[in-house]
Amino acid sequence: MTVQLPGALGRLQAEIARSNHHPAEQLPKTVGGGFGNVPAAPIDTTKEIPEPRRLSPRQAEQLMQAELVDAIRSLVESSTEIAGRLQRRGAVNGVLDVWAGVLPTGGTITRTYEIVAGSMRVTNHGTAGFLTVQSGVAAGDTGAQSAGTGVQYIAAGATHSFPLGDRSWTITGTAADRVSLQVFTGLQALGVSAL
C-alpha cells in the first residue's frame, strides 16, 4: 500500500504514478516549437540501458556513440520537416505576407494561409472611411462583420497592429481606397498610430 503524501507533494506523487502507467504509444508524437509541431524524438522504452558502473570503456564509448547518432538522426528529421514547412508556406523571419493595393469594386479582400497568422499590421491610406478587419473569411458576399469577436476598425490615415490567430482574414472598406498590410506568424508590437 502506498502512503499518500499531503499537499503539493501528494500532487507530485500522483502525477509521477500517473505518468509511470502510460505505455510508449501514448507518449507525445510531436512537440510544439517556434515553427509549429515537429516530430518528438523517438523514445525506446523497451531498450535495456546497462548500469554505467558496469560498463567497460569500450561499451561506454559505443553507448555514447549510439546516443549521439540517435540525437543527430532526430535533429536531421526535425530540421528536414521544418525546412519543408518553410518552403511550403514561404514564411521568412516570421513574415507571411506583405501587400499594398487598392480595394476592389466590392470593397472586400480576403486572404487564407496554410498556417495560422499570429498578428497583422494594417494601414488605411483612405481619407474618409474606416476599414473593418475580420478574423476569418466573411460569410457569403456580405463583407466583413461590423462588430463582434475578431473584428478591428482602422480609421482613415491610421495604422493598427493587432493579434489575429486565424488562417484567414477579410478587410472591408470603401472601394478604391488604398490599403497596405503585413501579416506575421507571431505577435508584433501592438498599437495604433497616425500616418
Image: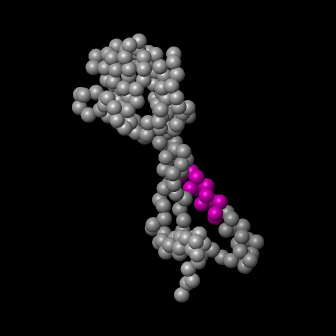
User: Does the rendering let one see residue 122?
Assistant: yes
Q: Position of residue 21 (x, y in %)?
A: 49, 74
Residue 67 in the image: above or below residue 124: below
Q: Main secondary structure of the magenta part?
A: helix
Q: Which residue does the image show at 64% across and 64% down from the upper left?
A: 66
- In the depicted structure, whether residue 87 falls above or below residue 97: below
Task: Residue 144 in the image: state x and y as whole percent.
Answer: 31, 29
- What colouring does the structure picture have? one colour
* Residue 73 counted in the magenta span: yes
Q: Which residues are magenta?
A: 66-77
Name the residue: 48% across, 61% down.
Answer: 28
Could you say which quadrant of the image residue 128 lies in? top left
Q: Is residue 106 above or below residue 23?
A: above
Note whether residue 112 is visible: no
Return the residue found at the far bottom.
1
Location of residue 90 in the rendering, given as x and y in whole percent from the top left corner: 47, 34
Residue that lies at the very extreme toward the top in this rendered image: 127
The residue positioned 60% from the left and 60% from the top of the image is 70
Q: Residue furthest front?
A: 7
Whether residue 169 sits left or right of residue 42 in the image: it is left
The N terminus - image quarter: bottom right
Question: What residue is rendered at 23% in x and 28% in y?
Answer: 141
Asked which quadrant contains residue 11, the reply is bottom right
- Magenta stretch containing residue 118, yes or no? no
